[in-house]
Amino acid sequence: MTKGEHTRKRILEAAAPIFNQRGYDGSSLSDLMEATGLKKGGIYRHFSSKQELAAEAFDYAWTAWQARVFRLDEKASSIDTLKQLIANFVKYRSSVPGGCPLLNTAVDADDGNSVLRTRAAAALRSWLGQVQSIIEQAKERGETRRAVDSGMVATLIVASLEGALMMSRLQRSDEPLRRIQSHLNGYLEDELMG
Amino acid sequence: MTKGEHTRKRILEAAAPIFNQRGYDGSSLSDLMEATGLKKGGIYRHFSSKQELAAEAFDYAWTAWQARVFRLDEKASSIDTLKQLIANFVKYRSSVPGGCPLLNTAVDADDGNSVLRTRAAAALRSWLGQVQSIIEQAKERGETRRAVDSGMVATLIVASLEGALMMSRLQRSDEPLRRIQSHLNGYLEDELMG
């Protein structure tokens, strides 16, 4: 890694929690300067604009999130893999402080900022696609009923986990996430395998 | 209504979509002045601070949301009432432009703004409580299995609808909400009544 690449990475590491906690408009240049220990020129030597910095910081946070939530062992069945994925989400939820970067950025950007919106939409597609392909693999292996709609199941897993995360963060209680984990585990056993 | 009350209501009507779309930090005084057609002094004669205005605008948006989502007919069964509630959420989702005020404010305020966070937490409690009491009523009437956990079912309904709304807004497609509606309707029939 060159010195420039190293500085760029250090800026993203410091900026990602700011954007994830405070949102795009709430993240001021002075917040970013304080977190990185750099002056304005030092930051904008590496990024062309605040929007580019926010978009790269989102990708940084999302990559870190995926590395945790998709850290999956070889399991006896794809259903067990899905259960581990759900458990990982409940356990890790935030890769950087402030909660799930996808949920935060989606809500922050859905009415405006098209660059951030595009990054969040790509992250959502990727997450849904990965969950769906685990279910398709389970179908191919004969571990599920053949009629299972993998798109439907992936939507249910992602929607209910993200909604429960919003509730858990607002209530400062793990209960909503635990309840959804328990529901999804039961659903995977009964509906997919039943 | 006095002239002062009328002006206050007009400010809230105009401010609620700004805060709901742009978030607290993204809503500038000039945005609020433009939307209300008032000068700074004209706005702050009625509200002691931006925070108070944002909190009252949230309550205004939330009351409007509840009036739509909880517009429930007399139904033959409480299960049908729950299905209507879910259909109302899918149909109306935003009471003011920008999506569900609860989801937006929860994500916006969960790391900071404690006044807004408290309002959003109260709104979530109220929503969960109302759903839970419909389920308890269904239990009392013998319309569900006696073992149904009303807190669990209410959590599932709220979490999956809010998560699906985030997905639908990001993808600009009704599909996630429609899928969750279909899942929840099936769940209510199979799990609660089965």
Image: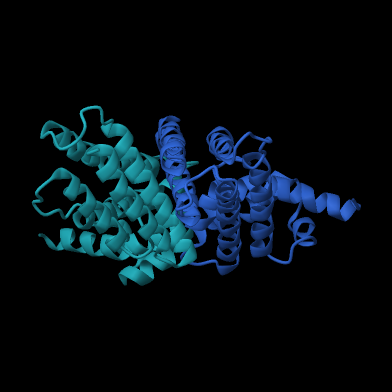
Chain colours: A cyan, B blue
Is residue B128 in view from this perspective?
yes
Most extreme residue toward the top is A147
Q: Quadrant of residue B177?
A: top left
Q: Position of residue A104 (x, y in %)?
A: 41, 53
Q: Is residue A90 left or right of residue A24?
A: left
Residue A49: in sight, yes or no? no
Q: In the image, what residue occupies the spot 33% across and 62% down? A: A15
Q: Quadrant of residue A71?
A: bottom left
Quarter of the picture containing the N terminus of chain A is bottom left
- Up-down: is B173 above or below A126? above
Residue at image point 17% right, 60% down:
A4
Q: Nearer the viewer, residue A4 or B160?
A: B160
Note whether A18 is above or below B83 in the view shown: below
In the rendered structure, the answer to whether residue A109 lies left or right of residue A5 reads right
Q: Position of residue B145 (x, y in %)?
A: 47, 47
Q: Nearer the viewer, residue B169 or B70?
A: B70
Give the side of residue B48 with respect to residue A54, left or right.
right
Quadrant in which the C terminus of chain A appears = top left
Q: Quadrant of residue A148?
A: top left
- Give residue B127's position: percent from left, percent from top: 58, 52
Q: Position of residue A62 (x, y in %)?
A: 27, 52
Tell me the residue at 75%/45% (across/down): B37
Please tell me whether residue A117 is drawn above or below residue A68 in the rendered image. Answer: above
Q: Is residue A31 left or right of residue B31?
A: left
